[in-house]
Image: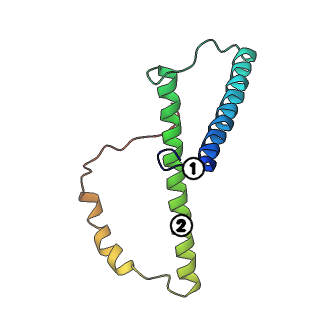
Amino acid sequence: MYNGYNGQKITNVKTRYRTTFTRWKVKEEELLRYEEQHGIATRWSESSQQYQDALSLLTEREYRRAIDNLERLIVQRLLELTKLGMNGVGERFILPRHRYASSLTLHWQVTNYAKK
């Protein structure tokens, strides 16, 4: 018994450590072969411009997927309401406020995500 661990638990931890390290070593070797085959001389760091550009693209992709998912859920809900014969629900709350929409000022910057 060592710090509350018996022999079986210690063996399990050692085995898990050894197998995890072996998997890491195999992936590292696979990565080195890939870099060699494709002529990659240096790896990106968090401060490199290429890393920042890729991170920006991934963030934008995640944002767009979230918007697409939201749009899908809204359309699904509208179709459900139409199927139930409730397709006019909420119009009395939306339409009166719509005439004031042109006088609103935005307090945030609208970003155009078109391809640069």
Q: Judge whether 69 appears above or below 46 on screen.
A: below
User: Hey, which quadrant is residue 80 in on the image?
Assistant: bottom right
At x 49% / y 41%, what residue is drawn? 60
The type of colouring in the image is rainbow
> Could you tell me if the residues under marks 2 and 1 are in contact, i.e. CB atoms within 8 Å?
no
Helix, strand, or loop for circle 1? Answer: loop
The residue lying toward the viewer, choosing from 21 and 94, is: 21
Helix, strand, or loop for circle 2? Answer: helix
Residue identifier under label 2: 73
Task: Give the residue type that dot 2 points to.
Answer: Leu
Residue neighbourhood size for the residue with mark 1, other residues' Cα within 10 Å, grouped as few (<14), some (14–19), many (≥20): few
The residue lying toward the viewer, choosing from 115 and 30, is: 30
Q: Judge whether 24 appears above or below 15 on screen.
A: above
Name the outermost residue toward the front.
1
Of label 2 and label 1, which has the lower sequence position? 1
The residue lying toward the viewer, choosing from 58 and 78, is: 58
Residue identifier under label 1: 6
At x 64% / y 32%, what residue is drawn? 21
